[in-house]
Amino acid sequence: MYKEVKTAEALGYLATKPTMIITTLHESKVVNAGVFGAYTNLSATHVGIAIAASHHTYANILRGGEFVINVPGANLVKKIAILASPIPKDKSEVDEAGLTTKAGITIETPSIAECVASVECKFDKELPIGVHSFVVGVACGGWIKEEFLDTDGKIDIFKARVIKDFKYPQPLYVLPGEVVHG
Ligand SMILES: Cc1cc2nc3c(=O)[nH]c(=O)nc-3n(C[C@H](O)[C@H](O)[C@H](O)COP(=O)(O)O)c2cc1C
């Protein structure tokens, strides 16, 4: 079951900074997907991502004004290489990877149904940095699969098996290890 959530909760799914998949729409409405690791939560409402200006994701966000951050579990690790490969605009990486889309809740752009959680965002502003642009988005909704909620109503990163890239561009990822009490 997918649980629809408010924005601050949705941004909490990025708290551990897992590798993420961004979905956007091409002008033709074909769904594009790319893989991203250079991002950070900026506040309870904002998130920023360094995206190469040559990427379809960048052009689609600037034109369409929206995007979805999808949080994959380790079960999707083999799909990531397909999603991160350059695929022409008339084909969807989501189809190429054998994944499926789930309709957006607050925006037109769909999420990836097989992911653990998603955060829907609207484009706010950008800061050019070399060949990249630091793209800032405002969260406007999202969902989580209920089986991955912990007793505090937050994402259970161990059950979800979120992954962090480890030696990019090598296809190596790490999983969360343990909780340390302070
Ligand atoms: C683990 C991983 C992390 C990545 N992180 C970024 C990133 O933070 N910024 C970026 O511009 N590209 C990043 N990439 C590369 C893009 O995913 C890749 O170039 C992709 O083809 C872009 O897709 P698009 O042209 O459909 O937007 C990453 C790739 C992988 C595999």
Image (cartoon, rainbow, N blue to C red):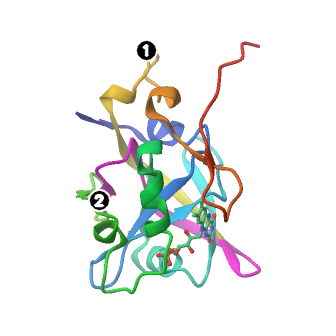
Residue 158 seen by the camera:
yes
The amino acid marked with disc number 2 is Leu
Q: Is residue 111 above or below residue 60?
A: above
Res. 73 in view = no
At 39% across and 41% down in the image, what residue appears? 116
- Which residue is under mark 1? 151
Main secondary structure of the magenta stretch: strand
Residue 38 vertical position relative to residue 28 in the rendered view, above or below? above
Residue under the point 52% across and 63% down = 35
Report the magenta residues as a range: 110-133
Q: Quadrant of residue 170?
A: bottom right
> Which SS class for mark 2?
loop
- From the image, tell me which residue sits under label 2: 99
Q: Quadrant of the N terminus?
A: top left
Q: Amino acid at mark 1?
A: Thr
Image coordinates of residue 49 in percent, x first then y, are 62, 62
